[in-house]
Image (cartoon, rainbow, N blue to C red):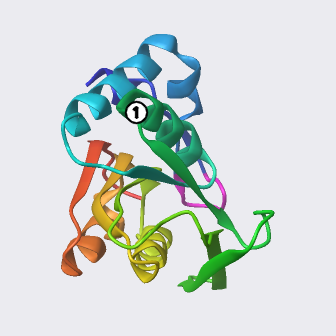
């Protein structure tokens, strides 16, 4: 697939032994970026979606472009303390502690159909927290969409185990 070939692998980042899948090389390539957004638009066009929610930071890039093409609004989901107005948040566990993601209290309304987007799914902790955040505000996550899935880390299975639909454009085996 042309998308996968445009994603750079950075060995030993952010720590030794990790093979980081960097989509910035995909984003800088106009053909790769166009293919990525076009494939996602083709998948979701015609579905009832009220908004696209993107997880900080690369999820903003893909999510905002996708929302624009679908003719819907965009909701940023950010790390704690980054949004200027009143927020609602969800804490979640990491390998090395806890973290928190937030969105504005008026970002999602009861019954809104939300497409959740991020660049990559690894263990699924951040995506699962984002789903809980959206659902806690009364939204329905219609699908969790990623450019890259790292299936060996179990994120897709984690989300599917809780009944969430997951889609990715490509996979990389291994860590």
Residue at horizontal 78 percent and vertical 63 percent from the top: 82
Secondary structure mainly formed by the magenta segment: loop
Tell me the crowding category of disc 1: few under 14, some 14 to 19, or many 20 or more residues within 10 angstroms, Cα based.
few
- Work out whether 130 lies above or below 149: below
Residue at horizontal 22 percent and vertical 29 percent from the top: 42
Residue 101 at x, y percent in the picture: 62, 73
Residue at horizontal 23 percent and vertical 81 percent from the top: 162
Q: Which residue is mark 1?
A: 71
Q: Quadrant of the N terminus?
A: top left
| Residue placed most toward the observer, 75 or 78 | 75
Residue 36 at x, y percent in the picture: 37, 27
Residue 34 at x, y percent in the picture: 41, 18
| Residue placed most toward the observer, 84 or 143 | 84
- Work out whether 39 lies above or below 20: above
Q: Quadrant of the C terminus?
A: bottom left
Asked if residue 44 lies left or right of residue 79, the reply is left
Q: Which residues are drawn in magenta?
A: 12-19
In the image, residue 27 lies in the stretch drawn in magenta? no
- Work out whether 92 lies above or below 173: below
In the image, residue 15 lies in the stretch drawn in magenta? yes
Residue 46 at x, y percent in the picture: 18, 36
Label 1: state its secondary structure: loop
Number of residue marks = 1
Residue at horizontal 62 percent and vertical 80 percent from the top: 89
């Amino acid at each position: 697939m042309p998308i996968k070939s445009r994603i750079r692998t950075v060995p030993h980042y952010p720590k030794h032994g990790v093979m980081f899948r960097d989509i910035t090389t995909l984003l800088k390539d106009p053909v790769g970026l166009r293919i990525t957004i076009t494939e996602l638009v083709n998948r979701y066009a015609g579905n009832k979606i009220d908004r696209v929610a993107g997880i900080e930071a690369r999820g903003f890039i893909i999510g905002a472009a996708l929302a624009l093409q679908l003719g819907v609004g965009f909701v940023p989901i950010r790390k704690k303390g980054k949004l200027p107005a009143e927020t609602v948040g969800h804490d979640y566990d990491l390998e090395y502690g806890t973290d928190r993601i937030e969105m504005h209290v008026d970002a999602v309304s009861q019954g809104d159909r939300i497409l959740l987007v991020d660049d990559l799914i690894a263990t699924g902790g951040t995506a699962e927290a984002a789903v809980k955040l959206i659902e806690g505000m009364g939204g329905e996550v219609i699908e969790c969409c990623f450019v890259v899935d790292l299936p060996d880390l179990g994120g897709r299975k984690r989300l599917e185990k809780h009944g969430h639909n997951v889609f990715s454009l490509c996979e990389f085996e291994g860590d």
